Image: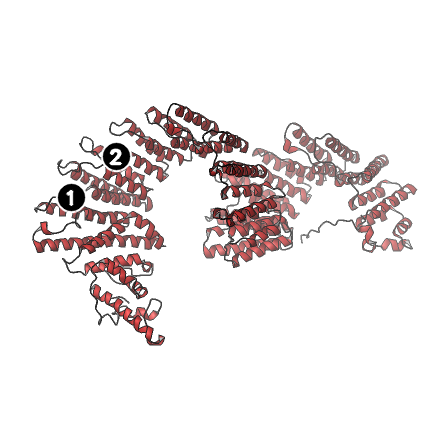
Amino acid sequence: MVIRSSPLRNTLAVVVAVQCMLCLAEAASPASLFVPSFSDPRHRQRSHGQHPASASLHATVPPSRTHAKTLTVSAAAPFIEGEMTVVKASGSIPKNNDEANTTKYEIDNLLLVEQTENTPLGQLTQDTKRDMLTVMRQLSSMGRRQDDIVATSSKDGAYSRQRRQDATTVERLLDRLLKDYQYSSEFTHDDRKVNQDNVNARTYNLAIKAWANANVRGSAEKAERILKRLKVANINRGKTDAPPAISLQPDLYSFAYCYAAWYRESVFAGHSIGNEKASSIAKRKAESVLQSMKQVLMQSNEQSRPLNMVEDVNSLLVMWSNTNTNLPDLSETFLRFIDVESTGTNDAWLNTRSYNLVINAWAKSGSNESINRAEALLKEMEKSTNVTPDLLSYSGVMSCIAKSVRATDAKKAEDVLHRMTKDGVEPDNVIVNQVMNIYIKKGSKGSAAHCEKLLKWMEDLKAEGNELVAPDVRTYNLLLSAYANEKGPSGAEKVLRRLEMHEDIKPNYITYTTCMDAYAKIGDAHNNLRILSLMEKEFKNGNSQAKPTRRAYVSALNSLAKSGRGDAGTRAEALVQAMERMSKAGNSEMKPDTTVYNVLINCHKNSAARAEKVLYRMGKRDVVSYSSVINVYSKMGGVKAAKRAQALLDEMQKDNVKPNAHTFNSAITAWSRSGSKGAAQKAEGLLKNMEELYYKEGDTNLQPSAQVYTSVISAWAKSNEPGSALRAEILLKLMWGMYKRGNKSVKPNVHTFTSVINAWARSREKEAGERAEALLDQMIKLYEKDQMVNSDVMPNVLSFTAAIHAYARTGARDGASKADGIMKKMESLKVEPNLQTYNVLISLWGNSQHKGAGKKAESILTKLEDEFRNGNKDMRPTVISYTSCINAWAKSTDYGKAESANAILERMKEMYSSGIIADQPNIFSYTAVINACATTYGEQGERQEAFRIAYSIFKEISELENLSPNHVTYSTFFRAISKLMPNGEKKESMVSAAFRLCVRDGQCDSNCLFHMKNAATPELVSDLLGCSDPSEAASLTVDELPYDWTRNVEHAPRRNKIK
């Protein structure tokens, strides 16, 4: 309902009417009375009429705003507040839903406006005028605009409308005061009898200031319009014989507010909307206002000019520095104009503080120009004869340097410090500490040495009598931080020891905590907890400043979380329990909160059950809590872990805790590592769920990143399911398409491409090698096209190795030549191969079936050994290196391959016994040599030598304490007997002995049974298997054998065949 009658008494009549209706409602039944409200749609249907009670009830106009306030908190307050948000008052009252968020404070202002505009001319009381001026001051304040309006306005449009409404309200109140003044002047015909306390230049200034601070379209023009009205009023005032005390002459604030309005409009037009022409016009307007100020205030006669303008100038600079942090130019331009135009005058306009305020404005701005602009002002002060830089001047420049990101600026800070002492300004420990802090923040090389030098300088100055520069505990804390950053925790602890032995200064809680953080950074929980014990001891010995804080305990917890210690969870639980005890004893600061429990969860990263127990023990759980537990499950592997991670993800959403990208990525990783059938589909399903939430809610924390997509691709790579590699590549192409359309967050990187290459390598599909190399070539092409933009796509050693591995696993005959081509590409990009690269190359040559493949594989192994001997510790050959080389000889057709394979084994044993390599031969190494013997197809002499080697290896394995033959060893040895031994009693005896050992060890599988039958006569087979006749023995399968014969056979997981 909109109240059309403008007199305030009709509005107040509504209040009285509603009060009466509410009183009647107490005695009436609920159904007998209806009071309209915004929640009832019928209420708006009478928006063009009056309230039924408003025509018959009347109220007197309250004498001041205090009475209006009383009405708003009466029994009818809920109704009247709702009604007043739609009262029409000269277009300044809200008319839509955005403007309906008017607060009670704003309603009071609107009531005051209505009251004053409807009060007869000449009848405004002094109380009402004072209320009007109070509201004008409040609404014109920049602080009011920033704090109150931003808090109550959620949209930029509502914010702008509120600023405009505030300025309009101030101007309406000014107009009302002027009308009352004009009426009173005309009525009395004597200005001397009119009280002019409420109408002077300062009253106009409030309206100018309100429009200047509104910073909306047209606000500068309106500010200047009021300034012109003030000038006209002053001219007209000069034609009367008004008392001199009543001044309508524009003062410094009048011009300054108007100048600021045009300056802001210039910046807005240039930077926000890109209208350079409008920006230039506004800037000329701002300069014009300053010229006008010069004519009025700086060139007038001595009697009318203020005696001292410094405080007014500084007051303006303080205001602009606090409310226009992004516009330091506003203050500097004003300062420089005053500086130039006040030269030659007798009055003081600027002092040292004026320059300091502008330097401080640049420091607050964080602008890239702040250092140069502030230093230029400082140099002008150093050369000036009117102002002299003081400690705050230099400190302001230091603040600008501190916010710079350039490491070279640290030296500049020290230069400024020494300039200050040369100019006769005595430093204090605050400014020297500031320089030390700059060195630490910049991470400059040698920062610890610089800080030591500054500490020595401070001590020397103190010895000369400057007590202000004496080092304090903060000085030593900064020195400790410098050592922690540059020398590590041991260097930091040395500074702690120095401070503990200092006569005048004792370490505080920051000292100990900083040292603890240095140890926590490297996961050294032992020393971190030791420093915590020292801190507790220092506090018990009477140093109240060393009282252990919550921050110290959190540092201890972080060190345990990073330590990887087996007892990290137990020790962390003890710390949290100690915090709980201190909290119950009255130290509320030590009460563990969500952050503490989240770190505790990370300490249990080796036990998902304990981590989950903490999750349900803590009070408030946030996204970090759930994500940390899900991350623990993601690292465990297995189906159960993946299912539990998924359950927690579902649970947190039911608990109204919104997951983020990290949460989803951990759950996706859990499925990726589960090794279960359908895991890749589950991972991709989570990705789709994440995408749906992101596009539905627009929450950037849910935006799938390249890391998330890469995790899903990795899940497909590990799935070994048919078509997994193709699906991984499709996701890669999807990512690239989204990136090209502008989504920079999903740009595929080297890890993404490498994951897809790995997917092809694991697939064993026929075209896997070609597809993997094509992706590698695409990476190289993208990188070479634009090395700056696509530096993150440059293939690394893992990319090249994965592509070689793709050829190695397919067993393609041309794989070796393809690998040579990939190695040349690798060399052209100056990417060094690693141990895995060499191992894959050895394996590839072993699978190549090329003549001379064994020799090629051995040459690669020799190169690997040479690199290690020459100092490359990363190239130490492993058991995989040697076993792959033995396998290469086993698969070759070269003469003497059994001897060559055995030589590699002997070489490995010698390298191990000499301590050159860390791995000793395993059962696969020995079995590979037997396989090389079993596949020897030479002359009788070569075959006899091969069996001698096979028998020798088999006998050695049987006699070793740390190794025993497995089912593959027995199967291969039976094959060697079958292929290499001539028929006869020796062969029968060898088969019989070997088979009895095989069943004794429980290692008889189908291959053992098959090759044993091939090596033995039917009669021996029947005897060994306990059958009545050879035909029964021939048809016997491994499933029919006694369990004890097969009990130790380890079956490798079956792979899904590609259809």
What residue sits right under mark 2 in the picture?
336
Q: Which mark is residue 249?
A: 1
Residue type at the position of mark 2:
Arg
Give the residue drawn at x 25%, y 27%.
385
- Contact (Cβ within 8 Å) of mark 2 with mark 1: no
Instruction: Tell me which label, 2 or 1, sits earlier in the chain.
Output: 1
Position of 27 with respect to 449 (left or right) is left
Kind of element beneath mark 1: loop
Position of 293 with respect to 643 (left or right) is left
- How far apart are the alpha carbons under marks 2 and 1? 24 Å
Q: Nearer the viewer, residue 406 or 928?
A: 406
Looking at the image, is 849 positioned above or below residue 445?
below
Q: Is there any visible trace of residue 878 in the rendered image?
A: yes
- Percent across and percent down for residue 761 are 64, 45
- Percent across and percent down for residue 65 are 23, 58
For disc 2, the neighbor class at 10 Å (few under 14, some 14 to 19, many from 20) is few
Residue type at the position of mark 1:
Gln
Quadrant of the rendering where the N terminus is positioned: bottom left
Kind of element beneath mark 2: helix
Q: Nearer the viewer, mark 2 or mark 1?
A: 1
Q: Across the whole image, how many numbered discs are drawn on residues? A: 2
